[in-house]
Image (cartoon, rainbow, N blue to C red):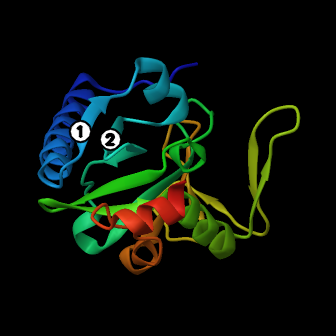
Amino acid sequence: MKPKLSKELLAHCAKIDDTACSLFIDTVKGEGWTVRKSTKEQDMFQHIDYIISRDGFTLTVDVKGAKRFSDQGLFIVELVNVIGNRGWLFGKANIIAFQVGNEFLFVDRNKLYSIVKEKMGLKVYTKGGFSVHCSGRQLYSKPVMAPNFYQRKGRKDMITFIERKDLENARTTLQTEQTLRENYE
């Protein structure tokens, strides 16, 4: 069964996403990147919003708009999405771009995965389907910090919150070509 979301909530989320995406496009174009929107399939199944290119070098990016906890230095990490499939942490994007005010914090998705895996004792099982297990962790029905999970009422998702300092440990920059080539080629 598909989770029921109010029209107001969907409109609010779309507005946040539109604002974040416009800001993202302006930001990366200002740094000399060309930007193209991903296909619907890439967006839905690989968690890629944009493909950016510069000087023959290409990266995939998943853009995360500012959420209500962002101003408190807390950021959502999605392990399982609302319909029970792989969350964006297990997507194919090279970079997760978290909106922080009028800027973005660019995070290497693989480094973020390693941080979450270590903090949560994360084990991912893919044989015969996708499942996530964190030994000794509880699933809460209200927002909680890692190393615990949060599942929103009426949804199949599994998320956690991570502090900005942890995101900073996975931070990357789009300005240093040499660093990008070392990390993503």
Q: Are marks 1 and 2 in contact (CB under 8 Å)?
A: yes
- The kind of residue tagged 1 is Thr
Residue 52, numbered circle: 2
Please tell me which residue is depicted at 16% across the width and 35% down the height of the picture: 15
Query: Does residue 128 sit above or below 120 in this rendering?
Result: above
Residue 155 in picture, x, y percent from top left? 53, 35
Please tell me which residue is depicted at 41% across the width and 19% down the height of the picture: 40
- Whether residue 45 is visible, yes or no, is yes
Answer with left or right where residue 6 lies relative to residue 59: left
Secondary structure beneath dot 2 equals strand
Residue labelled with disc 1: 34
- Whether residue 160 is visible, yes or no, is no
Binning the other alpha carbons within 10 Å of mark 2 as few (below 14), some (14 to 19) or many (20 upward) gives many
Please tell me which residue is depicted at 47% across the width and 58% down the height of the picture: 142
Closer-to-camera residue (1/19): 19
Sequence-earlier tag: 1 or 2: 1
Secondary structure beneath dot 1 equals strand
